[in-house]
Image (tube, rainbow, N blue to C red):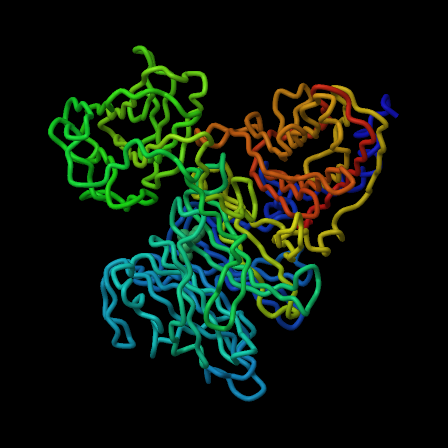
């Protein structure tokens, strides 16, 4: 088996498909540019972000999306539109909601939102037998104005509006008599009118009302409203902040799902985009979820869904920076601009909101903006616990904005911020320095952007502090703003996500379009390790385009097993035992989209020691457009009961999506490999992996 070149075999089988692709490359609209996804939706040209208004009706799946009709970066936000009858082959339709005043005098943009079919014409927009479709979305007003409804909006205000369609979603009429139908956030959040967005609406039969979940982005809250006619809305409750709050909260969704398929046991899941502050190890956008109950008015998360984090109980506080005393009064030695200063009370003038500190005060070196420089050194103390825990935020610069531990004049630990005003828990393992005298110093030597540091709550304990971990819906860097379909069977929950990241989304090297959607995924709730978790599976329908399935069983893989040239759009199912950890074996996986010499490659695998799936895109072709792009991502995945690890991998011309286990762990990442990167190999590091099963299918382009 081992000497057989699997790729060659596959290629012979696929020769037909190969020829037709070359043919297609000749025509202009053929979707064959270097990085053009072959089975992920992209508009022919221009910028796209969030999926919007996902709705199924009369046998057609509609997908609207944030779209800039005028260019390849964010702007002139309109609703693009595509339709599909199988969730796989899409047809791009004319723009559904064009920014008002486009192109030269834009007075209103159409931000994210959702669409419902108003079956009983509660809105009155339709007539008997002709239910209107109603879209509810965020209107963004670039400048202050008085609207046709007589309502006055402020400069850059975000408010909620509706439009209706009487022709099955093809064309839309804005409800100018009443828009915006939710003008301002409710008290006490009226000052949040710049960050109030992304209504997710659905019909809730038990209360016979519409429900809208809307995000108060900066204060990390979801507001729940109800309505009987889609025009007048009453606020019912608020949810949050919980778990990941590193950046704004956007694009919420709330939906019911039976647990383990048992329709008598229904739970609700809320999903919330967080940007920045996504999964650990990523930079930028991510989606967290909460499982709980919804009574038509309040969403209550299960205690298991909430992770408080923090230092262990019984920690000894060294300095919490509370109380009315200067640094000098606390025994800290100040230099530079810190001489004569005291801890501050949170956010300083000109600064974005500082979050995550404890009590009322912290060290915030944004005193005179980023220009402030100096150092603060604690009184000496004897190291007597195993860990020093603290909160840190601010600039990411280990040499200039840092908190450090000094022993005998040398720096033995240093930690910096992450270019975020959110403080997170960090720990130093100081077990090696027991009974030695130490000082902690906080330094700010930087004057440029992010030239400040935030520190709080330094304490000693025998275990490290943990952060407010989140339940991540996907652990990769390119999965954001997911939205579920309305109009499907009650518990059928199909979502589509934007496969990009605000961190570098505008600079990915694609043209004339920018951004793709993930493949549609079915969500369900499963009990795994005594917790109810959201699991994802690719929609069944994609199978129609996957073919020439070839299966290999490899009794043993040592080091490398070459799979040869397997192509650029492939589906891979990989199953292997996890029992090898005892042999000290570290990793098993597959390298895809590799050049023949493997100098370009994307590695997808499993780390047996830490029980994590990983994607390594540090050598995945063009990685030059953003310094945070070339990176290695990890996601936790426990082996299944029979000690097997399953990875279901979807490779396209510029992405990989990995479904681990039963779908409880997924990872999505864009890659931009060269044309000739079509090779693959299995790798087993630190020992052999036995009984490997691999199944590779070529996925046919949905555009030919
Ligand atoms: C999320 C988002 C939404 C907003 C839209 C604007 O990606 O920022 O909150 O409605 O994009 O395009």
- For image coordinates 45% across by 43% down, the residue present is 309
Name the quadrant containing residue 54.
Answer: bottom right
- The percent position of residue 402, horizontal first and vertical second, equals 31, 26
- The percent position of residue 39, horizontal first and vertical second, equals 65, 48
Residue 436 vertical position relative to residue 151 in the rendered view, above or below: above
Give whichever of 369, 230 is nearer the camera.
Answer: 369
Residue 343 vertical position relative to residue 560 in the rendered view, above or below: below
Residue 508 vertical position relative to residue 54 in the rendered view, above or below: above
- Quadrant of ligand 1: it is bottom left
Name the quadrant containing residue 615.
Answer: top right
Residue farthest left in this picture: 340
- For image coordinates 32% across by 16% down, the residue present is 437
Point out the image quarter for the N terminus: top right
Give whichever of 26, 213 is nearer the camera.
Answer: 213
Residue 27 vertical position relative to residue 463 in the rendered view, above or below: below
Give whichever of 639, 137 is nearer the camera.
Answer: 639
Residue farthest right in this picture: 1
Give whichever of 499, 297 is nearer the camera.
Answer: 297
User: Does residue 22 show up?
Assistant: no
User: Does residue 700 show up?
Assistant: yes
């Amino acid at each position: 088996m081992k000497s057989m070149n699997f790729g060659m075999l596959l290629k012979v089988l696929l020769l037909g498909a190969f020829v037709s692709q070359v043919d297609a490359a000749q025509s202009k609209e053929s979707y064959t540019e270097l990085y053009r996804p072959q089975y992920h939706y992209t508009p022919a040209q221009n910028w796209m972000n969030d999926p919007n208004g996902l709705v199924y009706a009369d046998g057609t799946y509609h997908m609207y999306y944030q779209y800039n009709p005028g260019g390849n970066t964010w702007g002139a936000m309109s609703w693009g539109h595509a339709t599909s009858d199988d969730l796989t082959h899409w047809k791009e339709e004319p723009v559904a909601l064009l920014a008002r005043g486009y192109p030269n005098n834009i007075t209103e943009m159409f931000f994210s939102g959702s669409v419902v079919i108003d079956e009983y014409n509660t809105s009155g927009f339709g007539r008997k037998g002709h239910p209107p479709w109603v879209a509810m979305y965020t209107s963004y007003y670039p400048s202050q104005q008085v609207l046709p409804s007589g309502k006055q909006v402020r400069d850059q205000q975000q408010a909620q509006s509706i439009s209706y369609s009487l022709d099955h979603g093809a064309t839309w009429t804005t409800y100018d008599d009443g828009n915006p139908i939710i003008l301002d956030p409710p008290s006490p959040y009226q000052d949040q009118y710049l960050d109030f967005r992304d209504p997710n609406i659905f019909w809730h039969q038990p209360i016979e009302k519409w429900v809208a979940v809307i995000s108060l982005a900066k204060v990390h809250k979801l507001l729940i409203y109800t309505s009987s006619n889609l025009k007048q809305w009453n606020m019912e409750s608020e949810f949050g902040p919980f778990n990941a709050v590193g950046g704004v909260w956007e694009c919420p969704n709330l939906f019911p799902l039976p647990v383990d398929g048992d329709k008598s046991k229904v739970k609700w899941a809320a999903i919330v985009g967080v940007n920045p502050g996504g999964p650990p190890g990523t930079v930028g956008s991510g989606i967290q979820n909460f499982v709980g109950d919804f009574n038509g008015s309040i969403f209550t998360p299960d205690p298991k869904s909430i992770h408080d984090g923090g230092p262990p109980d019984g920690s000894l506080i060294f300095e919490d920076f509370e109380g009315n005393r200067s640094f000098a009064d606390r025994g800290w030695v100040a230099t530079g601009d810190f001489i004569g200063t005291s801890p501050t009370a949170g956010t300083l003038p000109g600064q974005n909101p500082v979050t995550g500190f404890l009590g009322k005060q912290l060290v915030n070196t944004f005193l005179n903006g980023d220009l402030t420089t100096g150092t603060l050194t604690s009184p000496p103390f004897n190291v007597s616990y195993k860990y020093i825990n603290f909160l840190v935020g601010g600039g990411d610069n280990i040499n200039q904005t840092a908190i450090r531990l000094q022993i005998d004049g040398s720096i033995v630990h240093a930690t910096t911020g992450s270019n975020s005003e959110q403080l997170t828990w960090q720990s130093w393992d100081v077990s090696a320095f027991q009974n030695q005298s130490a000082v902690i110093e906080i330094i700010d030597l930087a004057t440029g952007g992010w030239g400040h540091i935030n520190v709080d709550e330094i304490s000693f304990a025998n275990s490290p502090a943990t952060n407010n971990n989140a339940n991540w819906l996907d652990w990769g860097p390119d999965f954001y703003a997911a939205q579920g379909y309305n109009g499907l069977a009650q518990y059928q929950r199909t979502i589509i996500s934007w496969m990009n990241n605000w961190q570098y989304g505008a600079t990915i090297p694609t043209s004339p379009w920018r951004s793709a959607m993930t493949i549609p995924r079915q969500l369900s709730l499963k009990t795994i390790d005594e917790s109810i978790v959201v699991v994802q599976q690719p929609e069944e329908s994609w199978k129609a385009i996957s073919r020439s399935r070839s299966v290999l069983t490899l009794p043993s893989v040592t080091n490398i097993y070459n799979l040869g040239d397997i192509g650029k759009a492939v589906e891979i199912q990989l199953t292997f035992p996890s029992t090898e950890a005892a042999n000290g074996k570290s990793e098993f996986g597959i390298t895809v989209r590799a050049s023949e010499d493997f100098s370009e490659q994307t590695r997808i695998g499993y780390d047996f020691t830490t029980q994590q799936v990983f994607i390594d895109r540090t050598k995945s072709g063009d990685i030059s457009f953003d310094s945070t792009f070339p990176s290695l991502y990890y996601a936790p995945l426990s082996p299944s009961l029979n000690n097997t690890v399953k990875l279901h991998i979807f490779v396209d011309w510029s992405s990989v999506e990995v479904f681990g286990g039963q779908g409880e762990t997924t990872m999505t990442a864009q890659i931009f490999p060269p044309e000739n990167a079509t090779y693959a190999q299995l790798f087993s590091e630190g020992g052999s992996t036995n009984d490997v099963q691999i199944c590779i299918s070529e996925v046919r382009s949905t555009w030919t």
